[in-house]
Image (cartoon, helix red, strand yellow):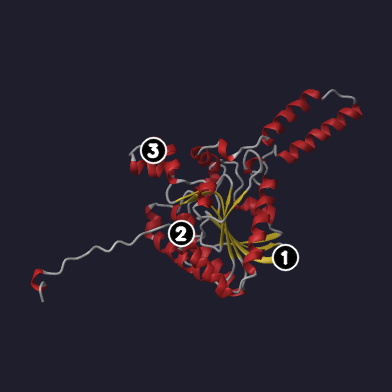
Amino acid sequence: MAGKPSASIHELEKKIEELKALSRVDGIDLSDEISRLKAKLETLRTPTAPKELDDWERVKLARHPKRPFTLDYLEEIMDDFYELRGDRLYGDDRAIVTSLARFEGRTVVAIGNQKGRTAEENRERNFGMSHPEGYRKALRAMKLAERFQFPIVSFIDTPGAYPGIASEERHIGGALAQNIYEMFQLPVPIVVAILGEGGSGGALGIGVGDRVLMMENAIYSVISPEGCAAILWRDRAKAPDAARALQVTAERLRELKVIDEIIPEPPGGAQSDYEAAAQSLKGALLRNLEEIESFDTMEMLQMRRQKFQTMGVYEELVEAVEPPASSRGR
């Protein structure tokens, strides 16, 4: 797998056993090397309890460059997948991946943001920030799911949609709004999983679903902490304060009923063990898909709309209006 850490828990355990066996058979003293690997293994296994990390630390962990991305998870949890490219209007945006995939015996449409790890990959993927054609490509794939009655699995990991002039010229706002509208109407099960960053409208453009799941160390917010700090305090250095005020963490968002479930990560974060993180995600996706598939279509759509309509609290104030003086006494 591209970008997979070379020292995952599973690999280290295997290497330690190999060195022990080699030491027994050949009589070579490898105790120093075994001790070093054991210390590294213990570091990876050290639990990162939610209470030990503040909101800003979680933001940094969600952005960790070695966290698994959409394609990494597709390789781990899908039996097979075939990537679909292009929006048939403008071009192919590599910041969003769309594919047909086999998942536990069923065909699904999988879509997701895709970041890069090297400078070259990030130029190709635009740091996971899609232009309008990326969201139109995603909609094309979702319409394919509607046509053939395939469930949709959506993976979110983006700082936001690309805010540049070219993006505005091709109507990024309209592309996001169209996707949000269409996802409420699609008569197929939709499960959304926030893998790392869930930023602004760029996340919502593929983020409407019957279930919204969130990796333990992911974040989800209407704006980045840096952007919020720049607006409120005119100082990006106050981003940690903004992160706390925005309440971006999975634990808090579940309390607010913005998300439905938190997916546990291996000790130290998803980047420490891709396989364990993928298996955790796979189990959550399968469980929620099977539950959604038990509902009939009309019930499913009604529950999807109600889920988002009940988010937040508002109060309507009706101001008393004095009648015109000319009408008084009549």
Pair 3/2: label in front: 2
Q: Which type of secondary structure does the marked residue at label 3 adopt?
A: helix
Mark 2 burial class by Cα count in 10 Å: few <14, some 14-19, many 20+: few
The answer to which image quadrant residue 147 occupies is bottom right
Residue sitting at the far left:
326
Q: Is residue 199 above or below residue 273?
A: below
User: Count of labels shown?
Assistant: 3
The answer to which image quadrant residue 117 occupies is top right
Residue sitting at the far front:
329
Looking at marks 1 and 2 on the same chain, the residue that comes earlier in the sequence is marked by 1
The kind of residue on which mark 1 rests is Gly
Residue drawn at the location 46% of the way across and 51% of the way down: 160
In this rendered view, identify the residue nearer to me: 130 or 118.
130
Pair 1/2: label in front: 2
Is residue 90 in view? no
Q: Which residue is mark 3?
A: 236
Q: Is residue 237 above or below residue 148?
A: above
Q: Which type of secondary structure does the marked residue at label 1 adopt?
A: loop
The kind of residue on which mark 2 rests is Met
Is residue 74 in view? yes
- Using the image, tell me which numbered label, if any, was put on residue 105: 1
Residue drawn at the location 61% of the way across and 71% of the way down: 295
Mark 1 burial class by Cα count in 10 Å: few <14, some 14-19, many 20+: few
Compute the Cα span from label 1 to label 2: 34 Å
Q: Where's the C terminus, which quadrant?
A: bottom left
Compute the Cα span from label 3 to label 1: 48 Å
In this rendered view, identify the residue nearer to me: 177 or 92.
177
In the image: residue 143, left or right of residue 2: left
- Using the image, tell me which numbered label, if any, was put on residue 171: none
Q: Which type of secondary structure does the marked residue at label 2 adopt?
A: loop
Looking at marks 3 and 1 on the same chain, the residue that comes earlier in the sequence is marked by 1
Q: Is residue 165 above or below residue 271?
A: below
